[in-house]
Image (cartoon, grey):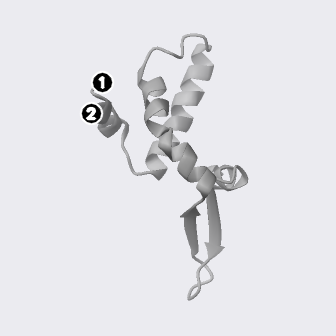
């Protein structure tokens, strides 16, 4: 589901594998690269107290979605904390 959303937002492009049609090759698009450049600020929002205007439910949902992005990038929340010095 997350991949479909990323693809729909034109962050990634999916292409069927040349040798195995069951596999897909994912490519970060130019739009995805721009978003990736903003990742440090996204991580700061996740780690900082900037979510106070959101309800507790919205904060939990946003944090879960950001964690999914980190997982796609293979960055654990703990590693993100270390990178940001949190």
Q: CA distance from mark 1 to mark 2?
A: 6 Å
Query: Which quadrant holds residue 4?
Result: bottom right
- Which mark identifies residue 16? none
Q: Where residue 60 appears, x then y in whole percent?
A: 55, 24
Which one is nearer the viewer's eye here, 74 or 84? 84
Tags 1 and 2 touching, CB below 8 Å: yes
Q: Is residue 26 above or below residue 48?
A: below
Which one is nearer the viewer's eye here, 26 or 37? 37
Q: Where residue 54 appears, x then y in whole percent?
A: 61, 15
**Residue at figure coordinates x 59%, y 73% from the top left:** 24
**Residue at figure coordinates x 27%, y 27% from the top left:** 85
Mark 1 lies on residue: 86
Q: Is residue 27 above or below residue 33?
A: below
Q: Where residue 38 appears, x then y in whole percent?
A: 50, 38
**Element carrying mark 1:** loop
Query: Which quadrant holds residue 82?
Result: top left
Mark 2 lies on residue: 82
Q: Residue furthest right?
A: 8
Give the left or right position of residue 63, taking residue 22 as reference: left
**Element carrying mark 2:** helix
Q: Where residue 51 appears, x then y in whole percent?
A: 54, 16
Instruction: Decide: few, some or many residues near mark 2? Use Cα within 10 Å; few <14, some 14-19, many ≥20.
Output: few
- Which quarter of the rendering shows the C terminus? top left
Q: Residue furthest bottom?
A: 19
Q: Is residue 6 above or below residue 24?
A: above
């Amino acid at each position: 589901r997350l991949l479909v959303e990323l693809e729909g937002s034109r962050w990634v492009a999916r292409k069927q594998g040349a040798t195995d049609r069951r596999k897909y090759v994912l490519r970060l698009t130019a739009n995805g690269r721009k978003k990736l450049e903003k990742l440090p600020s996204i991580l700061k929002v996740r780690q900082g107290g900037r979510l106070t205007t959101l309800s507790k439910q919205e904060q939990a949902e946003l944090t879960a979605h950001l964690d999914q992005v980190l997982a796609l990038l293979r960055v654990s929340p703990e590693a993100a904390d270390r990178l940001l010095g949190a």
